[in-house]
Image (cartoon, rainbow, N blue to C red):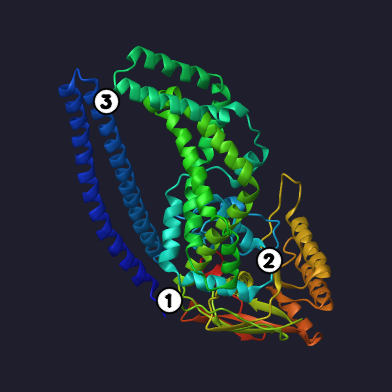
Amino acid sequence: MNNPKEFYREQISIHTISLKKVKKQLAVSSTIRLFVFFAMIAGIYFGYPSTQIIITSIVTGIAAFIFLVNRHTDLTYTKNKLQKLIELNQLELDVFDGDVSKLSSGKECIDPSHPFSHDIDLFGERSFFQYANRTTTLAGKDRLVGILTENSINDIPKKQDAINNIARLATWRQDYSATAALANATVPIANIKKWLQNYSSFVPKIMKVLPVIITGISLVMFVLLFLNIITFQLFVLWFFVGLAITGTQLKKVNALYNDASKVKDTFEQYYKLVDKIENTNFEAKLLQEKRQLVISDSEKASHTLKQFASILSALDQRNNMLFGVIANGLFLWDILQSYRIEQWISKNRSKVSQWFEVIAFFDAYTSLGNFAFNHPAYVYPKITSENVILKAEQLGHPMLDNKKRIDNDITIDQEQFFIITGANMAGKSTFLRTIALQIMMSNIGLPVCAKSCEYRPIKLISSMRTSDSLRDDASYFFSELTQLKKIVDALEADEYFIILDEILKGTNSKDKAAGSRKFVEKLVAAKATGIIATHDLSLCEIATELPQVQNRFFDAQIVNDELYFDYAFKDGVCQNMNASFLLKKMGIIES
């Protein structure tokens, strides 16, 4: 069994040592760059008035300076990545300590109309999503949300293998996440796809060869100037000719640049992520299938995406005023890069969607693998085709402190319905969410919080948390009826595990008891499987009439004038209720 905390501490130590070395290299790099700059100035000063010496000093100095700048940029990237890796490992330690404040809550994904997500706190503050999500791309986050809410029971063993495989690749996951986190990619993938698909070329056909011709002439004239064969005035005149040609396409180039600059960081990020996928040999079949989608016989997707990122970066150099003016005057830089962008889009736009989907998939599964890695004691459910829907030993809620959490055994067969009674605060609702989370986690391939688990895949639907809507003029009771109607309709189309918590709360107790009984009878007649929690003990009588229904309860006891809960799941009907005791204990009513 691995020790996640120890792993994270070791990684912080390793990356901290590497970070100190890189910082020293950066300090030396800055000193050398400064030396080269002054050396170039000295060459120009002492070489005057010799044109050859001045040009040689400038060209040599600029070439050396560019090399050093690139090297410095690489070192800076390494430094930033090491810092990000340290942050990622510290974040995991913080989460183990219960601090999830740095993680996205996913509250924007809350959907009360979803079959179960709102009931089980899948999104929002202190939610399962906040606890598990480690995605670093917008598309990956959307994909993870889709996985959690899909309610699909297909290919569960295949998903389990994939998550287990990624769980074992701890350093790969962190490297993947750190790489993605360093790019400031904020444009939705859907917008990028739309731009690529709808893009219309504007570069005239003559511009396909003209930049090459202009560049060749500029280089020849530069050599002639160096040899004092032509005058500087003639060279400047030629320079302005180039600027004039560039000016004819300036408006359209500016429009292209406006769009390209928005997506540059995304492609810079994505080619590095695809490269990590391509160069990893996965064992799980699902991961192998996804990896194959970015590998072709002719060229790797990472190379193609890197090429586009390089072109976009080249066009972005126009922001450097000195370089932009010189490059456009001598090489028609903007037109050349615009043509290269158009050629790339024309050739690859149909492939991009598939590549983006693969990246989103791996980003989402990195989160799932990280969750599995962080919980080495959890078990992957054994998928069966038996009549038993769920048979779990020591099943617990995955987000409760394992030192305080009380785990329970449960076995529920197909077409069996449990009625759970219990005192207030005895653990009924928590247990319902435990079961719901186990089903959701099992269906997406995650290990579950249990000592052992056998599971026959089934979709989940619930009615546990209903609210009224003044905006929609819908009462609480009507909203609940609407949800119950959805459950009945869903059962006509497929098999579901149903979880209900104190239904028909918006009506009087007599009507509530009669309605609840009829609804349970209807579910049993529809051969449904599920659980209902209630305070209404009269509902338990139905178990004497319908063999599919069984009673379970959570108990509360008064020990030394204090309320005591053991949170144990027991057979039978609860006999001890605590409302009167609590009212007396808090001084609300007289003894």
* Sequence-wise first label, 3 or 1: 3
Residue 68, image quadrant: top left
Q: Which residue is mark 1?
A: 403
Give, as a three-letter code, the residue at label 3: Ile
Question: Which mark is in front, 1 or 2?
Answer: 2
- Looking at the image, residue 145 lies above or below residue 580: above
Q: Secondary structure at mark 3?
A: helix
Residue at image coords 27%, 58%: 18
The image position of residue 573, as x and y in percent, is 67, 83
Q: Which mark is residue 151?
A: 2
**Badge 2: how crowded within 10 Å, few (<14), some, or many (20+)?**
many
- Looking at the image, residue 203 lies above or below residue 306: above
Q: Secondary structure at mark 1?
A: loop
Residue at image coords 31%, 51%: 79
> In terms of depth relative to the viewer, which is nearer, 384 or 328?
328
Q: Which residue is mark 3?
A: 55
Give, as a three-letter code, the residue at label 1: Lys
> Can residue 262 be seen?
yes
